[in-house]
């Protein structure tokens, strides 16, 4: 392993992770400095609905594609969402496994699993790029950050697929690309829309709490 | 437009006041949007205007979000073009924003229910309305109605004499049927009653029959009830205009009147936004801990039937009917099953509209849209979705528990020539009631 690859796998990743953690901590502090609104009135809705039930329902919404009309009517988009995010988790895991637990990748089955999941996420990334560029609705709401973040992740998926076997016998280029992209990703994320997962628990918790208190969540259908 | 450009006084005030309005929930909604587009087809404006992305909820939200990003968020401050952050500089910019937040959104909250991230556009759209109203930028109807509610205490400028006269007239109409003196049929300002009944001024002006029907129900149920001569309006234009001060003032007037009469419970006549304002938002706007119970008349009527205080014969309402869920009832107050339970007790042929409950589409009159005549053409165009929903029920009567929805639906029905009648639960209950 070259010094450059070693640095990319360790020093660079650790520095980028530390930077991301610092920025995220600052962002959370900034966010929490805004006062949370509350409800003074008595609860409404059916008996048994509570803020906590509402919050749990709201947070679980991610796993309830039938819960919202938007995901219920578009199961393919929901499937894309699942695959894309599984790809993110797999690629992040890979960026940890290669430097710290590379023996795991001696299993061809595991390598193929990583490649299958991340490869599928890459395909979804391509589909998402086409959708974002092709749909006038998506173009109208997209910023340069939206395009860049999506392309960045899609390219990163491709590099992760190539890096998964952790085999440098044919050269280190693919591994270097993956780790440099990962480091860039970690540094860029806190400033981009990709940081949405940082806010997700808060937005869903507060919406769920309010809707639970008002008896709207869990949603009843008929 | 260059950031160095001088900003108008109004634009400056809007930005300053935005900082004061932001709370954690709102900031969460402003930072969390990923522009996934899942909300797009949840909006009736989008569905009625295919190919026009400017109606998409995320697009509309971004007209407000860009201000937050440019002035309060990190990336937007440093690289505004990268995240489409922007500002307002001129009064024309504010007018443009006005046309979006008042003219292209009824704050129905349907997009909120369909957002995977939990972004609540309706809440910060209302905030944006409030910011514009604070500098006098609003549709003329909003200005007129707000002024009326500030000045007279009710949003239609009904004078106390006219209001009391209408109550007396309705009571006299019922004297013969109920065999009681008018003053006992609609008691005014009677202290220590179990129920204080508040109404929508629209009932006084255009639909006094609903007051008479409610009076008949209270009387037959043997309720100890009264109507206040002042502070009787349970509607609240503060909800629509985003003006929390107006919202708090109107709510407080009502709460204080009930307290003055030592009423045990405030019953709110059928009105989606009135119920939400009085029951849910009012205590927050007014910073007032309400010392009595509050409930919708839907729940009161249901209780009367269940407790045997009134008897009903559902065969008197034999025509097929459907039910329209008010957005404020269904998506902001969780009132979805009680109206249905009541309908099934007083009608023989109730047919659901699809989608329904919290997934129902707006009547087009939400968010105060009925008072903004400059946006009527686009409102009626957006009514295509509701019209199709109504038509598919194959009924001739649509029931709703909201005066705003009565007007919104009536407009849609007329515009799309559906030949349907709109009525409320109170009318059906009164019609079904057996008076022994």
Image: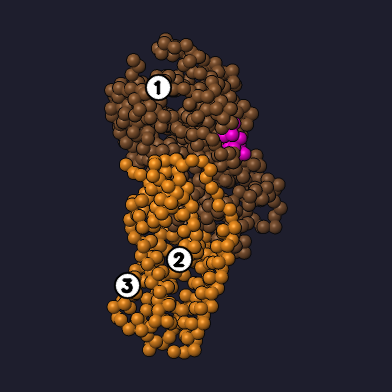
Chain colours: A orange, B brown
Residue A116 image-quadrant placement? bottom left
Residue of label 3: A116
Labels 1 and 3 in the same subunit: no
Residue B80 vs B126, above or below: the answer is below
Residue of label 1: B221
Residue of label 2: A150
Q: Residues within 10 Å of mark 2 (few under 14, many from 20)?
A: some
Q: Secondary structure at mark 1?
A: loop
Question: Residue A110 versus residue A135: which sits nearer the camera?
Answer: A110
Viewport quadrant of the C terminus of chain B: top left
Residue B200 vs B378, above or below: the answer is above
| Chain of the residue under label 3 | A
Q: Residues within 10 Å of mark 3 (few under 14, many from 20)?
A: some
Residue at left offset 41%, top offset 38%: B335
| C-alpha gap between disc 2 and disc 1 | 63 Å
Relative placement, left or right, of B19 versus B401 is: right
| C-alpha gap between disc 2 and disc 3 | 19 Å
Residue B43 visible from this viewpoint:
no
Nearer mark to the viewer, of 2 and 3: 3
């Amino acid at each position: 392993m070259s010094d450059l690859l070693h640095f990319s796998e360790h020093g660079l990743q650790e520095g980028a992770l530390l930077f991301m953690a610092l920025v995220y901590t600052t962002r959370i502090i900034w966010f929490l400095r805004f006062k949370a609104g509350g409800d003074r009135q008595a609860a409404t809705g059916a008996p048994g609905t509570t803020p906590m039930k509402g919050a749990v329902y709201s947070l679980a919404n991610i796993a309830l594609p039938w819960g919202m009309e938007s995901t219920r009517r578009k199961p393919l988009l929901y499937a894309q969402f699942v695959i894309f995010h599984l790809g993110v988790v797999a690629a992040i895991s890979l960026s940890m496994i290669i430097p710290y637990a590379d023996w795991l990748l001696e299993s061809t089955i595991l390598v193929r699993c990583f490649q299958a999941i991340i490869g599928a996420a890459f395909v979804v990334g391509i589909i998402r790029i086409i959708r974002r560029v092709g749909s006038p609705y998506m173009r109208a709401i997209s910023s340069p950050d939206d395009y860049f973040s999506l392309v960045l992740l899609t390219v990163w998926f491709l590099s992760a697929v190539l890096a998964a076997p952790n085999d440098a016998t044919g050269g280190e280029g693919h591994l270097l690309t993956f780790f440099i992209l990962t480091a860039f990703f970690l540094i860029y994320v806190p400033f981009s829309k990709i940081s949405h997962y940082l806010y997700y628990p808060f937005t869903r918790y507060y919406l769920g709490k309010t809707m639970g208190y008002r008896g709207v969540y869990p949603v009843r259908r008929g | 437009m260059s950031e160095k450009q001088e900003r108008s006084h109004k634009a400056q005030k809007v930005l300053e006041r935005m900082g004061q309005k932001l709370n954690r929930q709102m900031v969460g909604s402003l930072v969390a949007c990923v522009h996934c587009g899942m909300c797009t087809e949840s909006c009736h404006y989008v569905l009625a205007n295919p190919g026009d992305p400017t109606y998409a909820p995320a697009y509309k939200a971004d007209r407000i979000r860009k201000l937050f990003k440019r002035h309060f968020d990190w990336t937007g401050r440093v690289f505004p073009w990268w995240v489409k952050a922007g500002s307002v500089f001129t009064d024309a910019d504010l007018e443009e924003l006005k046309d979006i937040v008042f003219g292209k959104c009824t704050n129905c909250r349907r997009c909120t229910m369909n957002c995977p991230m939990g972004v609540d556009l309706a809440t910060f759209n209302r905030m944006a309305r409030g910011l514009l109203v604070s500098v006098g930028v609003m549709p003329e109807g909003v200005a007129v109605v707000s002024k009326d509610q500030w000045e007279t205490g009710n949003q239609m400028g009904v004078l106390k004499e006219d209001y009391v006269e209408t109550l007396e007239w309705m009571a006299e109409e019922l004297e013969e049927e109920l065999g009681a003196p008018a003053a006992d049929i609609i008691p005014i300002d009677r202290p220590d009653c179990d129920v204080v009944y508040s109404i929508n001024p629209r009932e006084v002006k255009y639909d006094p029959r609903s007051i008479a029907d409610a009076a008949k129900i209270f009387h037959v149920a043997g309720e100890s009830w009264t109507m206040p001569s002042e502070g009787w309006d349970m509607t609240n234009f503060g909800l629509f205009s985003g003006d929390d001060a107006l919202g708090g003032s109107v709510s407080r007037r009502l709460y204080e009147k009930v307290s003055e009469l030592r009423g045990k419970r405030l019953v709110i006549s059928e009105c989606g936004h009135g119920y939400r304002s009085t029951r849910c938002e009012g205590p927050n706007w007014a910073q007032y801990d309400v010392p009595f119970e509050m409930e919708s008349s839907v729940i009161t009527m249901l209780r009367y039937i269940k407790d045997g205080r009134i008897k009903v014969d559902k065969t008197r309402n034999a025509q097929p009917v459907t039910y329209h869920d008010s957005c404020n009832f269904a998506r902001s107050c969780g009132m979805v099953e009680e109206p249905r339970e009541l309908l099934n007790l007083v009608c023989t042929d109730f047919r659901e509209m699809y989608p329904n409950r919290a997934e129902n589409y707006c009547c087009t009159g939400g968010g105060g849209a009925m008072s903004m005549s400059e946006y009527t053409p686009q409102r009626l165009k957006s009514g295509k979705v509701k019209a199709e929903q109504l038509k598919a029920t194959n009924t001739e009567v649509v029931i709703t528990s909201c005066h705003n929805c009565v007007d919104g639906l009536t407009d849609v029905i007329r515009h799309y020539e559906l030949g349907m009648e709109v009525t409320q639960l109170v009318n059906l209950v009164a019609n079904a009631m057996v008076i022994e």
